[in-house]
Amino acid sequence: MAAVVGSVLFFGTQFVPVKRYKSGDGIFVQFMMGVGIFFVAFVVFALRRFPPFYPLPMLGGFFWALANAAAVPLVETIGLALTLLLCNTVSCIMGWATSRFGLFGLNPAPPKSDTLNYIGLVLLIVGYVFELEIGDC
């Protein structure tokens, strides 16, 4: 439960300052977010006694930073709620597809029940469409 509360407080509020204050083109916001992520990552790296470094996962970090940089103009254009909805829906679908079909060199992990798996995917997309109808809060 503590992990859920921590996730809501830290990940669920990352773009609130972007909504509240003028952020320009988002480059400074992205730079500050990157600096914050770097310092937290370094502390975790040190606490784990400096394990071996693998450069390939930096590609994932690059795409994450690129998505965060794109999120700033999106917040100003379509609003905070719809931006988070779009980013999280795409993230869920990509995570599902990566696991289900074994994308990016991973072994496929088919679920025990294909029916429930696809029902969950359809519910995710239906929820996205319903939220689009409601609009930005």
Image (cartoon, helix red, strand yellow):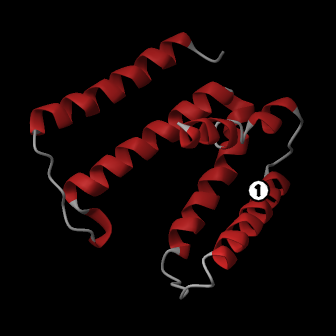
Query: Most extreme residue toward the top, as rendered?
Result: 134
Percent from the top left, x then y, of residue 5? 61, 35
**Residue at figure coordinates x 86%, y 45% from the top left:** 24
Q: Amino acid at mark 1?
A: Met
The quadrant in which the C terminus is found is: top right
Q: Is residue 26 above or below residue 86?
A: below
**Residue at figure coordinates x 64%, y 43% from the top left:** 11
- Front residue of 92/82: it is 92
How many residues crowd mark 1 within 10 Å: few (<14), some (14–19), many (20+)?
some
**Residue annotated with mark 1:** 33
Looking at the rendered structure, the number of numbered marks drawn on it comes to: 1
Q: Secondary structure at mark 1?
A: helix
Percent from the top left, x then y, of residue 74? 67, 37
Q: Is residue 129 above or below residue 2?
A: above
Q: Is residue 68 above or below residue 61?
A: above
Query: Most extreme residue toward the bottom, as rendered?
Result: 52
Percent from the top left, x then y, of residue 20? 85, 30
Does residue 20 appear left or right of residue 81 in this picture?
A: right
Percent from the top left, x then y, of residue 102? 23, 62
**Residue at figure coordinates x 53%, y 83% from the top left:** 55
- Front residue of 86/13: it is 13
**Residue at figure coordinates x 50%, y 19% from the top left:** 132
Res. 12 image quadrant: top right
Q: Is residue 135 above or below residue 118?
A: above
Res. 9 image quadrant: top right
Does residue 98 appear left or right of residue 59 in this picture?
A: left
